[in-house]
Image: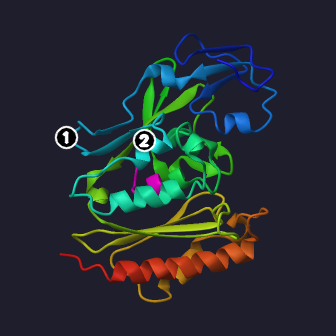
Amino acid sequence: MPVDLFTVQDVIAADADAWREGDRWLGGGTHLFAQPQPQVRRLRDLTTLAWPPLRVSPDPGEPGLDVAATCTVAELSRYAPPPCWPSLGPLIRDCCDAFLASFKVWNVATVGGNLCAALPAGPMISLVTAAAGSCLIRDLAGRQRRVPATGLVRDVGVTVLRPDEYLHTIRLPARVLGGRFALRRASLHPLGRSAALVVGHRDPDTGAVTLWVTAATRRPVGVALPGPPRPGELAELLDARIPAADWYDDVHGLPAWRRRMTLRLAEQVRAELARVTAP
């Protein structure tokens, strides 16, 4: 397998042997190969584990959709949810489109890779946090733990995974997938990287509303209400939840602009979800 990382000495199966210094997990590699990695000596190829990309969860205690970390963006974009999850298809398509990537990247980039890169603009982070996903994490010794997707990313480029751990599967629970989602996104340019992305969810039974902010902040930030918020309420809640230092600052948008756009998008999401009538 040819790679562009000149320090790499070997590419092995993901579970071939014990972890050692200089190892790095390999999924699609679109982020890994996009920048210098002088500390990397060996790549552990997760695709050798041959996980099914998508399947309905067999766990009767938590039905839903299991998305393998090695599922590609292209595979996810082609998924046709059952009628009982009417809002999931548009949410998936909107998040996949937020990559603004070529079909070549879509066919290589993985859901897990986008999550573990922990970049603010990662649209798979937006998807799994909004859907209240949970992440199954394993290590080479066979130990595993499950963490909420909302807590996977700690900061820009930082996750809760230890070096010898890898993300195996993301489970999106059916109790959430049956609700309604609304997404709004903003960037400085029509084909620019996401600078603010807001996803809201309304429970069809209780009317409860959750809203998650990504791209504009250093890590996902959410608010939850027992019912539809009143106009302007989300702005108050988000300002209370997000310190000034947590608004992301890079060439794709200044913090003050990201905040203004996020509050505007949140109000648009609120208005859309308010039009949804709970049974």
Of 90 and 163, nearer the camera is 90
- Give the residue drawn at x 34%, y 58%: 88
Determine the image quadrant of residue 164: top right
Write down the region rendered in magenta. 126-135
Q: Quadrant of residue 255?
A: bottom right
Crowdedness of circle 1 by 10 Å Cα count: few (<14), some, many (20+)? Answer: few
Q: Mark 2: which amino acid? A: Glu
Vertical arrangement, residue 204 with respect to residue 51, above or below: below
Determine the residue positioned at 69% across, 20% down: 2
Q: Tell me: 213 left or right of 182.
A: right
Of badges 2 and 1, the one in the foreground is 2
At which x and y percent is residue 271? 41, 84
Whole-percent x and y of residue 97? 52, 57
* Res. 235 image quadrant: bottom right
Looking at the image, residue 101 lies above or below residue 167: below
Determine the residue positioned at 40% across, 55% down. 132
Q: Is residue 231 above or below residue 129?
A: below
Quarter the C terminus occupies? bottom left
Is label 1 in a helix, a strand or a loop?
A: loop
User: Which label sits on residue 75?
Assistant: 2
Mark 1: amino acid: Pro
Q: Is residue 119 left or right of residue 81?
A: right
Mark earlier in primary sequence (2, 1): 1
Which mark is on residue 60? 1
Spatial CA span between label 2 and label 1: 25 Å
Is residue 26 rendered magenta in the image?
A: no
Left of 1 or right of it: where is 4? right
Q: Is residue 176 visible?
A: yes
Q: Position of residue 6 (x, y in %)?
A: 81, 22
Q: Residue at x 32, y 63 (%)?
A: 87
Q: Specify few, some or many for label 2: CA neighbours under 10 Å numbering under 14, 14-19, or 20 or more.
A: some
